[in-house]
Each structure stands twice: as C-alpha cells, then as structure tokens.
Image (spheres, helix red, strand yellow):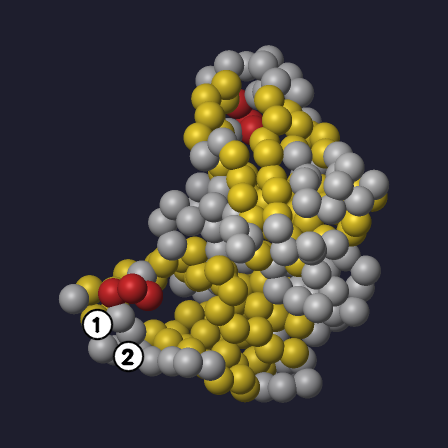
Amino acid sequence: GESVGLHLPTLSVQEGDNSIINCAYSNSASDYFIWYKQESGKGPQFIIDIRSNMDKRQGQRVTVLLNKTVKHLSLQIAATQPGDSAVYFCAETISGGSNYKLTFGKGTLLTVNP
Amino acid sequence: NAGVTQTPKFRILKIGQSMTLQCTQDMNHNYMYWYRQDPGMGLKLIYYSVGAGITDKGEVPNGYNVSRSTTEDFPLRLELAAPSQTSVYFCASSSRDSGEKLFFGSGTQLSVL
C-alpha cells in the first residue's frame, strides 16, 4: 500500500544555518507532493509543492527536491530562523483524481536554536 | 475571510459519550476532509466529501460518522467514544482550483477518559 516516511524524526539547527528535511515515499504512482508546516497548536500550513515532471522547485527561502529514481523528497530551508521551528510533513497523492486525497508522512520536528 | 473554522478547540469525553465536532469553511470549497493526528504521527484520513450530499470513508472511518448537508459545513460525529479516539482532529477543505492544496482548521483536541 501507500506509505510516506521520514528519515529523521527530529532536527536541531542553529539560527542562520540551512536545514534539510528528508522524506521517502513508496508509491511509484504518486505524482504530486506537498510540504506542510505545522506550528504548535495549529493546523498544517502549505509551504511548497512539486509535480513529478520536475526535480526542483524554489520558493521564498525554501526549495523542494524530488528524486523519482530513489523515491525521495527533501525540503531545504535557507538561513533558518526561530520562526521556522515546527513539525514538517510531506504528503503525496496521485493528481487528477476526483477527491484530492493526500497521504501524509509522520513528520519531522525542526528546532532552531538562537 | 475566516477560512476553516473548527469548534470546540478542546473537549474531554467519558467513555461511551457522544459528540459532534463542528467544521465550517467560507471559501466555497467543494472538498472537505476530516483527519486525526495521534502523537508523533502523521495525519490519517477519517472521512471526506467531494460536495454537498456526498461523503466517503477514508483510511480510519470506524467509530465516526459525517454528513454534508451544505457546502460550508462538514460535522464529524463520534458515537460511543472510546479511549482510542483520543487524538487531535483536523478539518480541511480544498477546491478544484486549489486541487490538492488543503487548507486546515486549527484542530480539536479530544480526550476520551
């Protein structure tokens, strides 16, 4: 069945450093991937997405890399700030369906030390 | 624009009690979802709806019921609450335009004791 997992459950970085959060997926049919950020006591918020016809996509301070060969996804955060401290989830789906269901990974807790 | 609003934020239930978790969205989204999040875990889909009058089971539907009488509202009903239903519940919505980009509410923390 489908599964989305993370290599590291926790990540601690110094303010100003770059952060890399990894995610492995097992459903080779998945063609759309999303990263969500969840701050304590809040619901997940969309960060960035990528489709399987791309291997890299950049946003503001964030970059998502997709390696379809090894079914691996990563989120890079540049110049990490204390406000980036949160749990980060990757999610996968097969796009173009009728219900837009997402399968979520377990999440990685990012802690930014001042 | 409030987005997705969930009530209550916190609730403690006794085993066997029932309750309804409310969810409403003001973005005119067709699709709505209920997820549960257990500590240290990802989100599991309970039920979803692709439009008013249409609902379908997700990954973990047992012990729950939903209805979708309007586009805006998607309540989740717990009958005969059990300790295994202790979790944080998130409602989300999306549209054909936003596609797979779900917009989440702030969650309901439920404890069943």
Look at 57% across and 80% down and name the residue there: A66
Closest to the observer: A63 or B18?
A: B18
Query: SS for tag 1?
Result: loop
Structural crowding at the residue carrying mark 1, measured as other residues with C-alpha within 10 Å and reported as few (<14), some (14–19) or many (≥20): some
Q: Is residue B109 visible?
A: no
- Residue beneath the point at 36% across and 58% down: A86
Q: Position of residue A72 (x, y in %)?
A: 56, 74
Chain at tag 1: A
Q: Give x and y (percent) for residue A96.
A: 79, 69
Tell me the residue at 68%/45% (across/down): B72
Side of A111 relative to B98 (left or right) = left
Q: Which mark is residue A79?
A: 2
Location of the N terminus of chain A (image quadrant): bottom right
- Residue lying at 16% horizontally and 66% vertically, measured from the top left: A114
Where A65 sits versus A34, above or below? below
Question: Label for residue A15?
Answer: 1
Q: For this rendering, which residue is in front, A107 or B66? A: B66
Along the horizontal axis of the image, is A96 left or right of B72? right
Alpha carbons under labels 2 and 1: distance apart: 7 Å
Q: Are marks 2 and 1 on the same chain?
A: yes
| x then y, percent, for residue B49 | 75, 47
Among the 4 quarters of the image, the one containing residue A9? bottom left
Residue ranking furthest to the front: B1
Spot the residue most to the left.
A114
Q: Is residue A50 above or below residue A82?
A: below
State the SS at label 2: loop
Q: Give the answer, above or below, for where A58 lies relative to B16.
A: below
Q: Tell which subunit mark 2 falls on.
A: A
